[in-house]
Amino acid sequence: MPFFKIFLLVIIILLIVIVISNIKIVPQAHAYVVERLGAYNATWSTGLHFAIPILDRVAKKITLKEIVADFPPQPVITKDNVTMQIDTVIYLQVTDPKLYTYGVDNPMRAIENLTATTLRNIIGDLELDQTLTSRDIINSKMRVILDEATDAWGIKINRVELKNIMPPKEIQDSMEKQMKAERERREKILQAEGEKRSAILVAEGEKEAAILRAEAEKEAAIKRAEGEAEAILKIQQAQAEGIRMLNAADPDAGVIAIKSLESLQKIADGKSTKIIIPSEIQGLAGLATSFKELIKEDETKK
């Protein structure tokens, strides 16, 4: 009896272990392909699942995340017979776990070989310069071709990128020389443009300075002319005021004659070689001479 209880306890424990071991939890962004008796049965998505012991088994665990496949460089030949090495990066995603499991043996290896042959076909229609400058076109063509070919495998190609394009060393050296010459040419152009701009700025500065100097001289000349005009005006006003005051004093003929003599003295001090004396002043001069003679005679008599 105790032996039977122990045997029953062992059986129960084994059943519990079998049941627990056949409880499956599928994580997020994953899918399990389940076979029953060796044939495809179902695809489990995220969540809790129970497999029938002995009959069911998980044939493949597949991630539904985007997969990055970095393939090694492949030798390709361009249209102008230049051999180069190109490595590619493929971004893909499993859309049908059943087709991915049963569509092709070793899907990643199949995609790598398909990528190499597609790349050779596309590059074979392009020359070296086109290959180096047409990355986007090559990427787009490869993505379309690979996506169409991998539909039967339950795979979607999201992006294809050419990571490195490596021409032969002699071509790389030639390209470097060409790039160096182009850089030197651009440097000379930039230097010439800089010198030209500098010369233009200097000329514009000299032009503006000349304009400012001319304007300053003009303003100075205007100020001088205004000062001279104002001085002349002041003199004329003073003379007019003197004449007005003289007229107001009602001077007699003697005063006027004396003033005329003073003016004559100033004229005589100048550099004029001819002096025209009014008749009134001549008469006054004769009168002065007669008066002087009379004074001498009186002194002689005494």
Image (cartoon, rainbow, N blue to C red):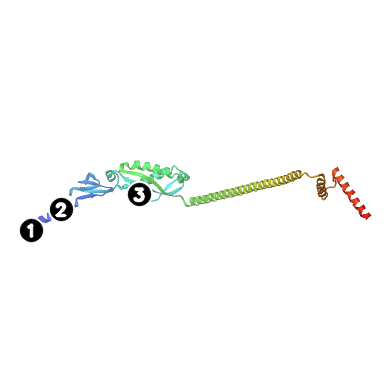
Q: Residue furthest toward the right?
A: 301
SS label for mark 3 = strand
Disc 2 to disc 3, how far (Cα)? 42 Å
Camera sees residue 160: yes
Disc 2 to disc 1, how far (Cα)? 20 Å
Q: Amino acid at mark 2?
A: Ile
Residue at 11% across, 56% down: 9
**Cβ atoms at labels 2 and 3 below 8 Å apart:** no
**Residue 161 screen position, x and y as percent:** 39, 47
Sequence-wise first label, 2 or 1: 1
Q: Amino acid at mark 1?
A: Phe
**Residue 201 screen position, x and y as percent:** 59, 48
Q: Residue furthest toward the front?
A: 302
| Viewer-proximal residue among 213 and 120 | 213
Image position of 125 with respect to 299: above or below: above
Residue hosting label 3: 69
Residue hosting label 2: 16
Estimate how packed mark 3 is, as few (under 14), some (14 to 19) or many (20 or more) residues with alpha carbons within 10 Å: some
Q: Give the quadrant of residue 256.
A: top right
Sequence-wise first label, 3 or 1: 1
SS label for mark 1 = helix
Camera sees residue 276: no
| Viewer-proximal residue among 200 and 135 | 200
Q: Amino acid at mark 3?
A: Ala
Residue hosting label 1: 3
Estimate how packed mark 1 is, as few (under 14), some (14 to 19) or many (20 or more) residues with alpha carbons within 10 Å: few
Disc 3 to disc 1, how far (Cα)? 59 Å
Q: Give the quadrant of residue 118.
A: top left
